[in-house]
């Protein structure tokens, strides 16, 4: 190869190597140019679905493209999250995940993806305190009375859950361990169908997320015993805390966040984060989320780094507890 042809080859090779990087940069600069899919790994009508739809509409205004909700259910939310793990890392598919899907499922299921390495944290969204709720005919007027009834009737009551290892399941196990009660579990594909059966009296209890339970509590179709947190929630200020209900320290809250596939370009991840932050700062969005009992993360914590560190800390806290309880999905 003469010098001229060698130089030509080197320049061509260098140019070819630069093409993918240049293409990614151009793609990030123009993103988005088509609708974006937000995977909600639970059925329509539940708390996670409501949260996703509230935020998606406001994100559309920032991104200039529709953010389309797709409900992909099954296996405690792991099927929907798995779809995001396999999606192209171009910013056009991301998920609204939660404590169940990004912490507990790592123990409950043999996942075909890694919760810490196969996703790109985008932004934490909200904290969801759990509520202890029951069918209207449950023969107890307060939490102390409910515990007494459960102790007097071991294994008679049934508690609905979003599946083995879900926050409803783990919160109920935690409650049992703290109160010395025993009852069975009935798994559902999401919070909405579980609540429908609770309202119909087919099951007795749910340790539900506030976003699922606040509306039927307000409507009088189920009864609430306590908030599993230190403070009452603005959406239902009449419900006492577990401390006020003479069962101190039995706290359990879930949380929500956004994740994209791993190695999503930083510029695209930053645009999604900015759109999420703007949505969460919107007064109408904040009012809607507060109305379903959700507490938005403070603005200085709405970063990918905070979500990643928070998820890792929750895994380190809860995985040993879940493994010790032998929590396993089907």
Image (cartoon, rainbow, N blue to C red):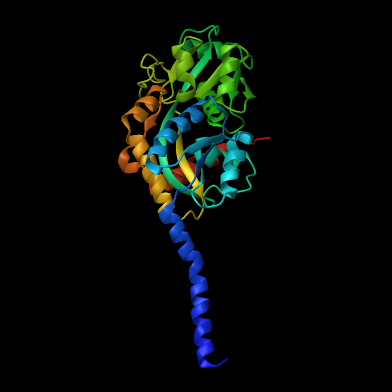
x, y percentage for residue 64? 41, 42
Quadrant occupied by the N terminus: bottom right
Residue 323 in the figure: left or right of residue 316: right
Nearest the camera: 275 or 8? 8
Q: Say if 129 sits above or below 142 in the image.
A: below
Please count the marks in the image: 0
x, y percentage for residue 279? 37, 36
Q: Is residue 327 in view from this perspective?
A: no
Q: Residue at x 44, y 51 (%)?
A: 31
Q: Looking at the image, which residue sits at the far bottom?
A: 2
Q: Is residue 139 in view from this perspective?
A: yes
Q: Say if 171 sits above or below 110 in the image.
A: above
Q: Say if 89 sits above or below 218 in the image.
A: below
Nearest the camera: 41 or 308? 41
Quadrant occupied by the C terminus: top right
Nearest the camera: 121 or 70? 70
> For residue 277, what is the image quadrant?
top left
Q: Residue at x 63, y 40 (%)?
A: 109
x, y percentage for residue 118? 54, 51
Nearest the camera: 239 or 39? 39
């Amino acid at each position: 190869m003469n010098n001229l042809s060698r130089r030509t080859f080197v320049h061509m090779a260098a140019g070819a190597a630069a093409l993918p990087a240049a293409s990614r940069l151009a793609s990030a600069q123009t993103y988005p140019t088509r609708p974006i899919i937000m995977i909600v790994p639970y059925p329509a009508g539940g708390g996670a679905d409501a949260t996703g739809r509230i935020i998606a509409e406001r994100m559309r205004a920032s991104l200039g493209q529709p953010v389309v909700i797709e409900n992909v259910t099954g296996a405690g939310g792991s099927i929907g999250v798995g779809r995001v793990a396999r999606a192209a890392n171009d910013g056009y598919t991301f998920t609204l995940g939660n404590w169940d899907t990004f912490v507990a499922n790592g123990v409950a299921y043999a996942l075909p993806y890694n919760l810490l390495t196969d996703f790109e944290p985008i932004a934490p969204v909200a904290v969801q305190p759990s509520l202890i709720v029951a069918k209207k005919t449950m023969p107890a007027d307060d939490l102390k009375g409910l515990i007494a009834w459960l102790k007097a009737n071991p294994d008679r009551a049934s508690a609905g859950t979003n599946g083995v290892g879900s926050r409803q399941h783990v919160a109920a196990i935690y409650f049992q361990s703290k109160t010395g009660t025993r009852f069975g579990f009935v798994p559902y594909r999401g919070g909405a169908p579980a609540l429908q059966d609770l309202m119909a009296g087919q099951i007795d209890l749910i340790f539900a997320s506030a976003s699922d339970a606040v509306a039927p509590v307000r409507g009088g179709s189920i009864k609430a015993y306590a908030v599993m947190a230190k403070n009452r929630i603005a959406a239902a200020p009449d419900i006492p805390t577990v401390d006020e209900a003479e069962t101190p320290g039995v706290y359990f809250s879930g949380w929500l966040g956004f994740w994209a596939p791993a190695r999503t370009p930083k510029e695209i991840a930053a645009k999604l984060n900015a759109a999420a932050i703007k949505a969460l700062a919107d007064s109408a969005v904040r009012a809607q989320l507060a109305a379903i009992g959700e507490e938005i993360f403070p603005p200085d914590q709405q970063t990918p780094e905070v979500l990643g560190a928070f998820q890792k800390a929750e895994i380190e806290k809860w995985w040993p507890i879940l493994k010790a309880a032998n929590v396993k999905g089907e």
